[in-house]
């Protein structure tokens, strides 16, 4: 497959418990899936992938509900995150931002994955993004994932064994919205 067809790099945004190094931000939605002794999983999604494009549209179309939730937090809601596309030359990498706040009509959060393709960007770095530029948003409410449209696309592509493993490892459940 050529570079143009592999433009989108989606870092698996699902939590795996345990075995995390101290330099990784502790956030259940955005972190790469970590398996003991193995590199983080990455999913490469083709530009033409209709399910992923639909997921991004759904996230952008429903971003107002995310803004409402982030403005009115509750004890049951946690881990507000958005996924931002970072562009460097011809490379595009989609990275989750954690600890997200909303002010000045922009989301502000910290890079929550180790960039693979984008140089000069570091985990923990504070960045901002406009609502119309995000590719996904997510938070956990009463232990269930809310939003996370691209997460759901990737989850649905997992083998039944990996889904079961992930459900066991996660601190949230992926249910139908």
Image: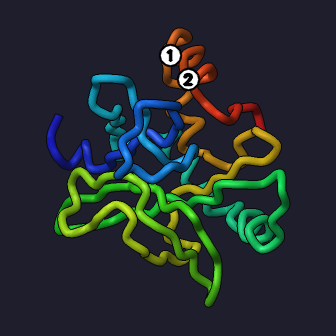
Residue 72 visible at all: yes
> Which residue does the image show at 28% across and 23% down from the upper left?
37
Q: CA distance from mark 2 to mark 1?
A: 6 Å
Residue 62 x, y percent position in the rendering: 71, 61
> Which residue does the image show at 29% across and 64% down from the upper left?
122
Relative to 141, residue 41 above or below: above
> Which residue does the image show at 15% across and 40% down from the upper left?
2
> Which residue does the image show at 82% across and 43% down from the upper left?
142
Instruction: Assess disc 2: are there few (<14), some (14-19) or many (≥20) residues with their C-alpha within 10 Å of its C-alpha.
Output: many
Residue 86 x, y percent position in the rendering: 33, 65
Q: Give the residue at the far top of this rendering.
A: 161
Residue 54 visible at all: no
Task: State the residue in front, 130 or 112.
Answer: 112
Residue 82 x, y percent position in the rendering: 55, 61
Instruction: Assess disc 1: are there few (<14), some (14-19) or many (≥20) residues with their C-alpha within 10 Å of its C-alpha.
Output: few
Task: State the residue in front, 83 or 54.
Answer: 83
Relative to 145, residue 78 above or below: below
Q: Give the residue at the far bottom of this rendering.
A: 104
- What residue did someone put label 1 on? 162
The reply to whether callout 2 and callout 1 are in contact (CB within 8 Å) is yes
Using the rendered view, name the quadrant where residue 164 is placed: top right
Count of numbered badges drawn on the protein: 2
Taking the image as shown, residue 41 lies to the left or right of residue 160, namely left
Query: Does dot 2 land on a helix, a strand or a loop?
Result: helix
Looking at the rendering, in which quadrant would you find the N terminus?
top left
Using the rendered view, name the quadrant where residue 174 is placed: top right
Looking at the rendering, in which quadrant would you find the C terminus?
top right
Image disc number at residue 93: none
- What residue did someone put label 2 on? 166
Relative to 54, residue 108 above or below: below
Query: Does dot 1 land on a helix, a strand or a loop?
Result: helix
């Amino acid at each position: 497959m050529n570079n143009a067809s592999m433009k989108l790099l989606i870092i698996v945004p699902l939590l795996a418990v345990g075995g995390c190094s101290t330099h990784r931000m502790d956030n259940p939605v955005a972190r790469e899936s970590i398996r003991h002794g193995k590199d983080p999983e990455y999913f490469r999604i083709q530009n033409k992938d209709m399910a992923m494009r639909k997921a991004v549209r759904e996230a952008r179309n429903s971003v107002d509900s995310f803004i409402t939730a982030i403005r009115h937090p509750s004890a049951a809601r946690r881990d507000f995150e958005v996924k931002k596309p970072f562009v460097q030359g011809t490379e595009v990498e989609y990275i989750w931002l954690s600890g997200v706040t909303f002010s000045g009509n922009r989301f502000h959060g910290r890079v929550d994955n180790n960039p693979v393709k984008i140089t000069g960007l570091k985990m923990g770095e504070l960045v901002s993004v406009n609502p119309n530029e995000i590719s996904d948003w997510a938070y956990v409410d009463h232990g269930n994932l809310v939003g996370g449209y691209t997460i759901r696309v990737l989850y649905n592509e997992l083998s039944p064994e990996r889904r079961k493993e992930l459900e066991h490892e996660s601190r949230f459940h992926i249910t139908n919205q």
